[in-house]
Image: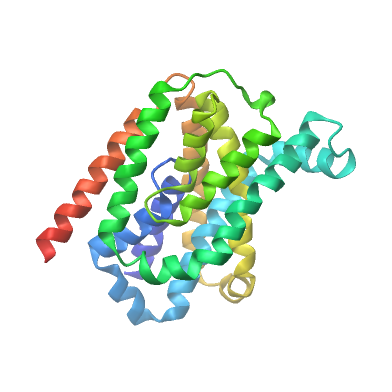
Amino acid sequence: MLWLIAIVLGIVQGIGEFLPISSSGHLIIVRWLLGWDTAIAQAGDHVDIALDVALHVGTLVAVLVYFFRDWLSLTTNGLTKGLKTKEGKMFWYLVAATIPGGMAGLALESFIDKFVRSQPLIIAAGFAGMGIVLYYVDKKSAQTINFERITFGNAMLIGLFQAAALIPGVSRSGITMTAARLLGFTREAAARFSFLLATPIIAGAALKHARDILHNIASPLFVVGAITSAIVGLICIKFLLRYLQRNSFAVFAAYRICMALVICAVYLFRQ
């Protein structure tokens, strides 16, 4: 059973982390819908921790592998040439834009874990609300800013919006892509910047649990969950960047609203 859970949650994490549909919301709801919280609890806290860390490690590997050349160029230029090159500027833009989300996470994570993650209707509201906003902003906004024209102000505003992703159902990629579209980014540029901005956030989450990673790295469940989320994550990054070259975010907005309705229906049925 735990093997199946690791594989399914790995798939969910890989899809939800990079498509604008909320990985945290889906992980909570999938476990709730399928009754897996009990099975994981019975296996012990170490299993729950191992799975959670493995999924984040997997998506970190995915984004690092896909954007390896980008990050090599950004880091090299940022640390050696500072703001003298566009790659150096982008590196420091990403560093600065990570700060608001990181600070919000440190301040509010325990509150969110305690009072929000166990509330399906709040998560459903996050799904639906973000879906409506994503659709409206994407439909009404121009596409005039490509990746090379991103400014420091653009980056910081997107970073501020990223803090809202702490609420399960909102979606880190969803809120950052929406903010980018609001500023007039092309859809592909919005996705690319969102993925690069995800890297330090996911890395920070992984480093926070470095001890757990070292303790569980040889665990078969850890390996299965990490590999699954990494492979699926790579596929989703490539898919979305290509998809958005010719298509809008409408399908993801519609999916989010449908998911919210399903959550509400199941919640009412179980009362």
158 vs 5, nearest the viewer? 158
Question: Looking at the rendering, in which quadrant would you find the C terminus?
Answer: bottom left
- Give the residue furthest to the right: 80
Report the residue at 69% width, 25% height from top.
Answer: 148
- Residue 235 visible in image: no
Q: What x and y, as percent, mark residue 54?
A: 52, 63
- The answer to whether residue 238 is left or right of residue 33 is right
Residue 79, image quadrant: top right
Q: Give the colouring mode of the picture.
A: rainbow
Q: How many numbered badges does the structure rendering display?
A: 0
- Residue 144, compared with residue 122, is above or below; it is above
27 vs 194, left or right, is left
Q: Quadrant of the N terminus?
A: bottom left
Give residue 124's position: percent from left, percent from top: 28, 52
At x 37%, y 80%, the residue is 43
Do we see residue 35 in this rendering?
Answer: yes
Residue at coordinates 28% horizontally, 75% vertically from top-left?
38
- Identify the image quadrant of residue 34: bottom left
- The foreground one among 195 and 217 is 195
Q: Is residue 14 above or below residue 113?
A: above
In the foreground, 125 or 148: 125
Q: Position of residue 47 (x, y in %)?
A: 44, 75
Residue 191 placement (x, y as % from top left): 53, 33
Which residue is drawn at the image coordinates 43% and 65% (left, top)? 112
